[in-house]
Image (cartoon, rainbow, N blue to C red):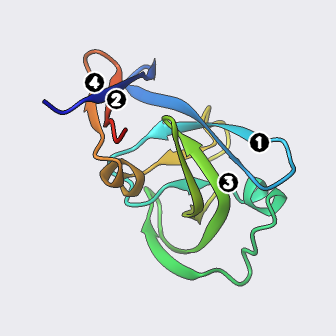
Amino acid sequence: MIARRIYRLNRQGNLLWLRASVGRARENPIVLRLLVDTGSSYTVLPCRILERLGCNLQQPLQSTTIVTASAVVKMPVVPVPWFNCLGVRKENFSVVAMDLPMGSFANGLLGIDFLREEKAIIDIFKNEIYLRDNS
């Protein structure tokens, strides 16, 4: 039997969200509200937060093409010094720099990149997410 860690997700209408944090050495973490988005290939964080962390959006690691509801856009991919979500801390985790539309209650998106790597299972009826326990 595989041991799993269970985390409660928050629900707003049909949207599931959770809190995550990002940061860099010797500074207080920045707490974010992320939508759990299995339709997003990448984890997405807002540009202003990434700039506060010292990420260079003008010279990204790479760029990726994102299809939004209204356009196809090229967005920078940058590493954050550390990203902590669902009890998992990742160093130099790559994220897409993109601001969500004004009025969004979330700061960003937790994408399938993180969810797949952590072998997440989402129970939409119980509002829970399960991660394999690697301990």
Residue 100 seen from this side: no
Give me the C-alpha separation between circle 3 and circle 1: 15 Å
Name the residue furthest top.
126
The spot of residue 75 in percent (x, y) is 57, 73
Marking on residue 66: none
Q: Residues within 10 Å of mark 4 (few under 14, many from 20)?
A: few
In this rendering, position of residue 110 left or right of residue 123: right
Q: Residue at x 81, y 55 (%)?
A: 25
Q: Earlier in the sequence, mark 3 or mark 2?
A: 3
Secondary structure of the residue carrying numbered label 3? loop
Type of the residue with mark 1 = Pro
Q: Residue at x 84, y 41 (%)?
A: 28
Residue 102 seen from this side: yes
Q: How crowded is mark 2: few (under 14 residues within 10 Å), some or many (20 or more)?
A: some
Give me the C-alpha separation between circle 3 and circle 4: 26 Å
Q: Which residue bears the numbered disc 2?
A: 129
Q: Which of marks 3 and 1 is nearer the N terminus?
A: 1
Q: Which residue bears the numbered disc 3?
A: 46
Type of the residue with mark 3 = Pro
Secondary structure of the residue carrying numbered label 4? loop
Q: Earlier in the sequence, mark 2 or mark 1?
A: 1
Q: How crowded is mark 1: few (under 14 residues within 10 Å), some or many (20 or more)?
A: some
Secondary structure of the residue carrying numbered label 2? strand
Residue 84 occupies quadrant: top right
Q: Which residue bears the numbered disc 1?
A: 29
Type of the residue with mark 2 = Ile
